[in-house]
Image: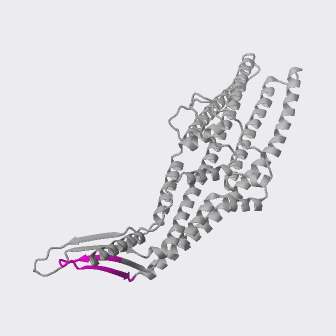
Amino acid sequence: MCKSIRSAILQRTIQIGLTILLTGCASSIDAWKDVEKATLLAQDRTTVLIQTEIDWNPSMSLTRNAAISYAIMHDAHLHNDFAIIVQRRGEIAQAELPPNPTFSGAFGVAIDGLSGAPLVMQGMQGLSWLWTRPDRIAAAEQTLQQAVLRAAHRTITIVAEVRAAYAEVSFNKAQLKIAKQKIALANKRYEITSQLEKAGEASALEIDDATTVVNKSKRNELAKETALRLSYLKLLQTMGCPDQLDSFMITDVYDVDSFNTYDELQLLELAVANRLDLATKRAAVQQRYSELGLANPPLLSGSVGFNENFTDRQALTLGGSITIALDGDAKEAIANSKLQQAEFAYIDAMRTAQYEVRSALALFNTAKEQTEVIDAELIHALTSKMQRANSAFQNGELQPLLHIDVQQELLAAHSLMIEDTRLLTLSAIQLEFAVGGTFQSLHQ
């Protein structure tokens, strides 16, 4: 009876011990909600609708939104960030659990004829996790938060890069059209000059000048064709398919929704609140702060043992141990240093963000003034001049070559207008990205 009671007590003690050793409820390792959170964060900070179900191939015309959606679906860096989110979610589940317990056993055979302890069983468990568990979970949660923010920031980066690359294609197409018109005028000038030379009204030097203009126009056209093809290749590379054919058509034109006037202080405040790279740095600071409690915890462990010798005598042993950390001060110094590094990294990121906002705003305002004031006045003046030249040419009051000069001057002004509008568009995209992806909160 006594033996059966002792066995029951032993079994119950082992069950309780195992419960203590294995206690802890790990979080789910399903990271789908975290990936969805990153997607929603990015969507809230972009000016376009991300439609990941859009399918595109080079035989189809390409809209701006289709290019953005295709790029998001095929970006290797973004999918790498999603994989890191899955990893971080698993690490949180690990942080919530105690260290893996150790179980050992041995069976002995007495060789001296005396009673011994032929059966030895022992379980050991570190106890330091009881103190460090909250800090480990907090640090793991901050690393997950950083992964989510990085994925969202990468999505916003893709949107900005594709918008800029798409706009480059659009503007290069417009410049190539101007270049072709310049060639047509240069050829017309050469034909007229040749006729005048045959009639004795133009010199060989004037023929040379006309030939030079034709050759320069052809060179300019070739440069514009190359720029257009390179911009197509850049767009494909940004979309994640640099091996695709570059013979597709784009449908959208310029990519600036509005030419608003922005206050620098408001933009700086928006950047601090809205930029996800800054939020990532803040999460890194929180992670390092949580890790201070992990630097030098008390290193304790407990054990439960069971012995039984040849005379059926049984013994239950409870024990514990403590490890003296000789490098405790060094661990604390390292943890404090990592916290300071994270804080300085955040300060540097803040300064970089401020510079990016202010420099992008300066470019935007300059391009805006050039486009809306200087170029507009130039186009207006040359258009009026062109109208008067047309009237004079029709009345026979203006020589054909002078009429061509006015046309070339107007084409050159339109080329400048396209270039300045390109700078305005790209600076607007850059400014939106610098404040976090969108001006939406400023317009509400």
Q: Say above or below: 43 vs 12.
A: above
Depicted 173 relative to depicted 142: above or below: above
Closer to the camera in the image, 236 or 403: 236
Q: Quadrant of residue 8?
A: bottom left
Which residue occupies the foreground of this view, 97 or 383? 97
Quadrant where the N terminus is found in the figure: bottom left
* Colour scheme of the picture: one colour
- Left or right: 305 as drawn, with respect to 249: left
Q: Nearer the viewer, residue 186 or 147?
A: 147
Does residue 205 appear in the picture of this structure?
A: no
- The stretch of residues the image draws in magenta is 303-324
**Front residue (pair 397, 135):** 135
- Left/right of residue 420 with respect to residue 343 in the rendered view: right
Question: In the picture, residue 163 is in which quadrant?
Answer: top right
Residue at the far top in the pictured view: 199
Residue beneath the point at 23% across and 76% down: 308
Residue drawn at x 81%, y 26% as measured from the top left: 403
Taking the image as shown, residue 193 lies to the left or right of residue 304, namely right
- Would residue 397 be seen by someone viewing this image from the given angle? yes
Q: Position of residue 192 (x, y in %)?
A: 74, 20
Residue 210 appears at what percent x and percent y?
A: 69, 27
Number of numbered discs: 0
313 is within the stretch colored magenta: yes
Q: Residue 332 in the image: state x and y as whole percent.
A: 48, 79
Residue 387 position, x and y percent, is: 87, 29
What secondary structure predominates along the stretch shown in magenta?
strand
Residue extending farthest front: 1
Magenta-drawn stretch contains 327: no
